[in-house]
Amino acid sequence: MSFTNKVVMITGAGRPNGIGAGIARCFTEAGARVVITDLEGSPLSETVDSIDGEVWPLVADAADQASMRQAVAATIKEHGRLDVLVNNAGIGGPTLGFDEVEEQSPTLAMSDEAWDQQLVSNLRTTFSSASAAAPSLSDGGSIVNIASIAALGPTTQLPAYGAAKAGVVHFTKTLAIQLAPKIRVNCICPGLLWTRAWEMLGARMQAADPVYANMTPRQVFEAFVAQATPLGGEQTPEDIGNLAAFYASDKARMITGQVVAVDGGISLS
Ligand SMILES: NC(=O)c1ccc[n+]([C@@H]2O[C@H](COP(=O)([O-])OP(=O)(O)OC[C@H]3O[C@@H](n4cnc5c(N)ncnc54)[C@H](O)[C@@H]3O)[C@@H](O)[C@H]2O)c1
């Protein structure tokens, strides 16, 4: 796969250990120029420093069409084109309203605001960024949406997150039809990765569940991975990035509207 002379934008790629940074590494290794966006500037520049290759940071809100239009315009001005958009921005788990979740009925215990915040962060991001970028994507271009295994079945602990990611899967298919034949649209459902999202989730589970009380957040994560993953072992950001690059490459020229879990088999059971 070669992305020489191609320009790729990845949203929510502001953390050096995040999935977005791993995706960026896979594209730069294949010769792409990569624009990474996030809500804040400082982790973005740290991420740029951690990646070999041509990477440019841009502060932009992926859930805001106007902000993303500005980011797309700045990219076209600087690099002359945009070939691939990876919708990676998202907040993996309940943040606002976290403490409101009750054991018996977590879905109904959420506030309207907590529910909305999850849908904005995990679903509207995909819509707003795709809407802003699609008119500028080059012919033969590609959109890759990052959903989650939480999209593939009931998620009692992360109900709004699961619903939002299921929306990303559905929206992928609609968009694939609407943007054909010019642009292909595909989706990846990552499984379990040790990023900031799981650092937070592991800490919460350690605090909330006596089973995990004597573990560090990392040990909570490892216990989860061991129990859930048929292939054994956690997934890495590059595991996700390799499929993103394949989807966006000419080798996948007849693939659109598809959803693949990169999860070591977790979603099989
Ligand atoms: N870590 C996992 O196990 C896992 C599993 C399945 C899916 N995912 C998904 O992968 C994606 C990347 O997550 P990650 O694990 O690397 O977490 P992360 O927290 O390291 O990265 C997500 C980034 O998205 C950014 N972001 C959030 N809302 C944004 C917005 N409106 N505009 C711009 N940036 C925004 C955050 O600032 C953050 O830097 C997310 O969509 C997440 O839901 C993660």
Image (spheres, helix red, strand yellow):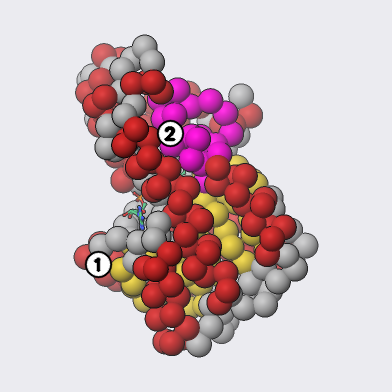
Left or right of 172: which side holds 28? left
Which residue is disc 1 drawn over?
41
The magenta segment is 147-166
Confirm whether the magenta stretch covers residue 102: no
- Give, as a three-letter code, the residue at label 1: Gly
Q: Residue furthest top?
A: 104
Q: Position of residue 261 (x, y in %)?
A: 60, 42
State the residue at coordinates (62%, 67%). Answer: 142
Quadrant where the C terminus lies? top right
Front tag of 1 and 2 = 2
Q: Is residue 118 above or below residue 221?
A: below
Among the 4 quarters of the image, the one containing residue 185 = bottom right
The CB of the residue at mark 2 lies under 8 Å from ligand 1: no
SS for dot 1? helix
State the separation of the CA atoms marked 1 and 2.
28 Å
State the residue at coordinates (38%, 40%). Answer: 116
Which residue is disc 2 drawn over?
160
State the residue at coordinates (42%, 87%). Answer: 78
The CB of the residue at mark 1 lies under 8 Å from ligand 1: no
Looking at the image, tell me whether mark 1 or mark 2 is earlier in sequence order.
1
**Residue 240 visible (yes or no):** no
